[in-house]
Amino acid sequence: MADFVLALDQGTSSSRAILFDHAGVPVASAQSAPGGFEQIYPRPGWVEHDPEAIWQSQLETARKALASANAAPGDIAAIGITNQRETTILWERATGRPIYNAIVWQDRRTADLCRRLSDDGHADLVAARTGLVIDPYFSATKIAWLLDNVEGAREAAAGGEILFGTVDSFLLWRLTGGKVHATDATNASRTMVFNIHTQDWDDELLELLSIPRAILPDVLDNSAGFGETEKDLFAGAIAITGMAGDQQAATVGQACFAPGMIKGTYGTGAFILLNTGAKPVASKNRLLTTIAYRLRGETTYAVEGSLFIAGAAVQWLRDGLKLIETAGATEAIAEGIADTGGVYLVPAFTGLGAPYWDPAARGAIVGLTRATGVAEIVRRDDGQARFAQDLLAEIHVGALQAYHQRH
């Protein structure tokens, strides 16, 4: 019997790989270098990644984790993939070459398109079919932008020469040598063109955004046969049997299997998911209805609250303002002063998520005086975790109320 499962965790800021034994204990891991791969900001509100950098960083960490444990492909029972959701990549079917950078979930370039869709009265249709609000956060308007703005993309897509995927699909395509074009139900549910009730791509929404169905991946359960890796990647083939978007993977990882259970996680952003069981629940508090997981063809739904910036604000202190050398330094700095002296930071660097859904919002620091220094800004920024907790607690109450009203 194989000894390990290899988990690939492709996040917004870095890539990781972890080997787990039969008891679920991590025995080896590797993470991309501090700072991860490059965060690309071509214009205000635009956020991109190089898909090749994503692929190389994930492949390298996987190889390092295997080498650290001296593990061969025959020692690995399976690979599971979790990924930054909504981030959108289009690539050539024949070569696997991306036609443009990955447009990251934080990107706001399609705000005008989203506004037009809402103004034209499509918000209720989108909510009813997908459980989502119309927002640049999701993949659909990113796909439309790429098809309309990359020369020749729409014609190539119509001819079946271009494929779409979120990061999981792109990694799967590369890992299998282009043999498998698939995603899972959780990632599909974040595209804004997947009907969470019929469990299929929605033709009316695809037509609304002029997205050809032919470019879309097959949608499988979270636990399914996703193919196997090319032998030359790891000196042997390894089965790929699991896939889930990062927040849904965290929901499963934190064992939120019963309706009413909630998980909250803090990474680049901060997200809560409330398990609502076999029935989708429509929030009255501008939260999202989404798929928590789908196993053996049975779908479990969730209500989600999304904050776009949490740990990314600390990363901004380090890499943008260069006020700190390491993210961990914020704790000592924040504890070194009694309060912020009235300084307050609004981390709307990429708009505001739940419950505001305002793509035009931008970050601000207010309450500055001559006495304000680095420590006050760091403390206020470090306090975004507490701000997130307060807001998520408020969202918890609204989500629970919605759940109990339904049940």
Image (cartoon, rainbow, N blue to C red):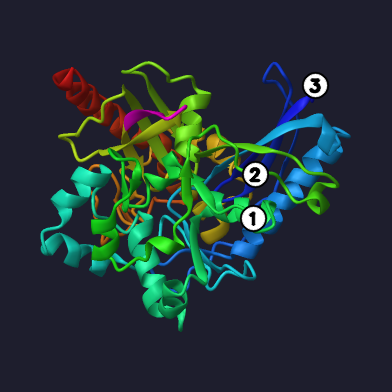
Q: Quadrant of residue 23?
A: top right
Question: Label 3 amino acid?
Answer: Met
Q: In which quarter of the image is residue 145?
A: bottom left
Instruction: Name the residue: 15% across, 57% down.
Output: 122
Q: Quadrant of the C terminus?
A: top left
Closer to the chain start, of discs 2 and 1, is: 1
Question: Looking at the figure, which quarter contains the N terminus?
Answer: top right
- Which residue bears the numbered disc 3? 1
Quick one: 399 or 7, which is closer to the camera?
A: 7
**Residue 386 appears in the rendering:** no
> Which one is nearer the viewer's eye here, 325 or 392?
392
Q: Where is residue 144 in the image (x, y as percent from the top left)?
A: 35, 68
Give the Cα distance between marks 2 and 1: 8 Å
Q: Which residue is drawn at 33% across and 30% down?
A: 301
> Whole-percent x and y of residue 162?
50, 69
Q: Mark 2 points at which residue?
A: 227
Q: Earlier in the sequence, mark 1 or mark 3?
A: 3
Q: Are marks 2 and 1 in contact (CB under 8 Å)?
A: yes
